[in-house]
Image (spheres, grey):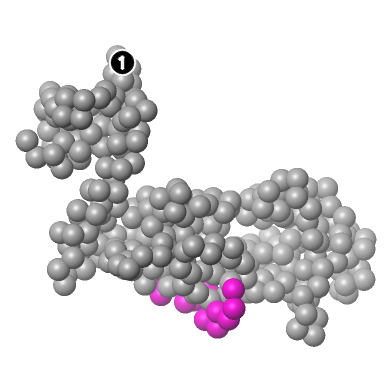
Amino acid sequence: MNKLELLRTFVRVSELSSFTLAGESLGLPRSTVSEQVRALENLLGTRLLNRTTRRVRTTQDGALLYERSKDLLSGMDEIESLFSADDAELAGRLRIDLPTMMARRVIVPALPRFLERFPRLDVEISCTDRQVDLLREGFDCVMRIGALSDLDVVARPVGRLSMRNCASPAYLERHGVPRRLEDLDSHRLVHYVRNLGARSAGFEYEQGGELRFQAMAGVVTVNNAEAYSAACLAGLGLIQVPAVGVDEHLRAGELVSLLEPWQARAMPVSLLYARQRHVPRRVQAFMNWLAVLLESQVDPSAGEN
């Protein structure tokens, strides 16, 4: 029996937690799926799945094999398409991590066009504002907004996101409109930190090419971009956010742009991938597509990260 097919069946059962659903996905009878999993367990000499009447779960050995198998099967798909000049033949798993705001507003809505061009790719998308470990967590590509600290990966600069200072009309009606930096002493800032418990630097602006910060009061601190915008919409204070994240709200009058001479420094956007001699074509294809997609959102003068 083909060992790769046994692995494919096992991976599908692990993903769906069901022999029946895995069989439907693979076009196989449930009995065949069960036989293939047992054959793989006999071949490896270990139990891979715990079976109950309600659910199928991987054992510790099964979880380890699942992660290794996904990489192996993805590599085999890459080899099959390595010498094909047809982009549509690119195949395999593509695992990416995206900032929540960019995923929801820009990338996921455009993803159908990418998958129409590469129909054999299987895309796994993680959306988080935390700084994931590309290598340890097994990502093919990570989009990062802001300064980089990953020294053991390759960074491909894409551009910079221009920033906006914003507040809601309701907030401005209660607290007035700040027109100078001195006015911020009587206003509130929604504080954003990567990790709760960290101290916010305050209101950021550039003056004479130098980055400066002004401490501000605030009653809300968040560590998520969507919560950051939501807090501003709720009238909890000012925010400083990439324009792409609030343009819709500005056009709708739900937010107001403020203090335009004192914007925060534009944030660099980078695509990170593993340092290796051969970057898989599927990863190259995704990064090239993403760079083109973002052209309308970023200043192409990426500069130093």
Q: Residue at x 16, y 29 (%)?
A: 43
Query: In the current view of this chain or complex, which residue is farthest to the left?
Result: 1
Q: Residue farthest to the bottom? A: 208
From what the image shows, is residue 170 above or below residue 7?
Answer: below
Determine the main secondary structure of the stretch shown in magenta.
loop
Residue 150 drawn at (x, y percent): 54, 62
Instruction: Using a 10 Å C-alpha cutoff, classify the residue at mark 1 as few (fewer than 14 neighbours), some (14 to 19) or many (20 or more).
Output: few
Q: Is residue 54 something that shows in the picture?
A: yes
Q: Name the one closer to the observer, 206 or 77.
A: 77
> What residue lies at 85% left-to-right and 56% top-to-bottom?
188
Task: Give whichever of 51, 43 is nearer the camera.
Answer: 43
Asked whether residue 303 is drawn in magenta, I would say yes
Q: Amino acid at mark 1?
A: Thr
Name the quadrant of the N terminus: top left
Give the residue number, with chain letter if any, for mark 1.
52
Do we see residue 17 in this rendering?
no
